[in-house]
Amino acid sequence: MDHHDAVRLDGHLVAWWETGTEGVYWSLVTDWSATERSHDNLYVLEEGDVLTIFNEDGSVAWHGKIAWDLHTRRLQSPFNSDRIQQEVAGLWVHGLQRGVDAETWADYFMGHEMLLPTIRQQLRSKPLRALLYRPSPHAR
């Protein structure tokens, strides 16, 4: 993607879910300091987005194009035998990034909220900062 034809979003990573989503959506929030959360500043990652994730020290943790793997780590729900969905860290999720360990991917989005013992032993102080480039709706 040519960044000149893209919308640039600067924000923080979150694992977003609410009643009815039936799992985590990997997302970016552009105004983490907002006292009230709103869908207006929430961007669910989409196939083809270009994402750069920064470690707490500012170094790049991961950079690449979002390419969902929708088939690995699929489990049958113990509550609904018709439902088969991906799982990581004990949570249902909608997609995992191809080529990235599932726990590492989850930690990028949840390491400030919950521990993933195989990855980290203590919570991060805040969510990781990220830059998201999304194709402009006006690009041809």
Image (tube, rainbow, N blue to C red):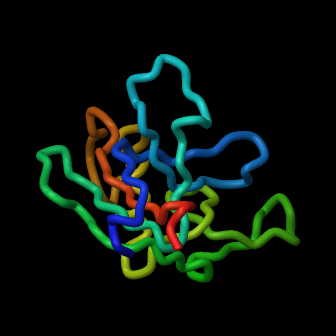
| Placement of 127 over or under 25, stated as above or below | above
- Which quadrant of the figure contains the N terminus? bottom left
In the rendered view, does 30 fall on the left or right side of 55? right
Residue visible at 83% across and 58% down in the picture = 79
Could you say which is closer to the camera, residue 109 or residue 113?
109
Q: Residue at x 42, y 38 (%)?
A: 30
Whether residue 124 can be seen here: yes
Identify the residue shown where x is 58% and y is 35%: 40
Residue nearer the viewer, 93 or 78: 93
65 w.r.t. 87: above or below:
below
Residue 99 in the image, given as x and y percentages of width and height:
38, 81
Locate residue 112: give its quadrant.
top left
- Side of 19 where 67 appears, left or right: left
Viewed as shown, does residue 102 lie left or right of 68?
left
Q: Quadrant of residue 84?
A: bottom right
The picture quadrant where one finds residue 134 is bottom left
**Number of numbered discs:** 0
Residue 59 x %, y %? 13, 55
Relative depth, front residue between 55 and 51: 51
Residue 116: in sight, yes or no? no
Residue at image location 41% in from the left, 50% down from the top: 109
Q: Is residue 111 above or below residue 119?
A: above
For this orientation, the residue located farthest to the top is: 35
Residue 55 percent across, percent down from the top left: 20, 51
Estimate the x, y position of residue 131 in percent, counting from the top left: 32, 53
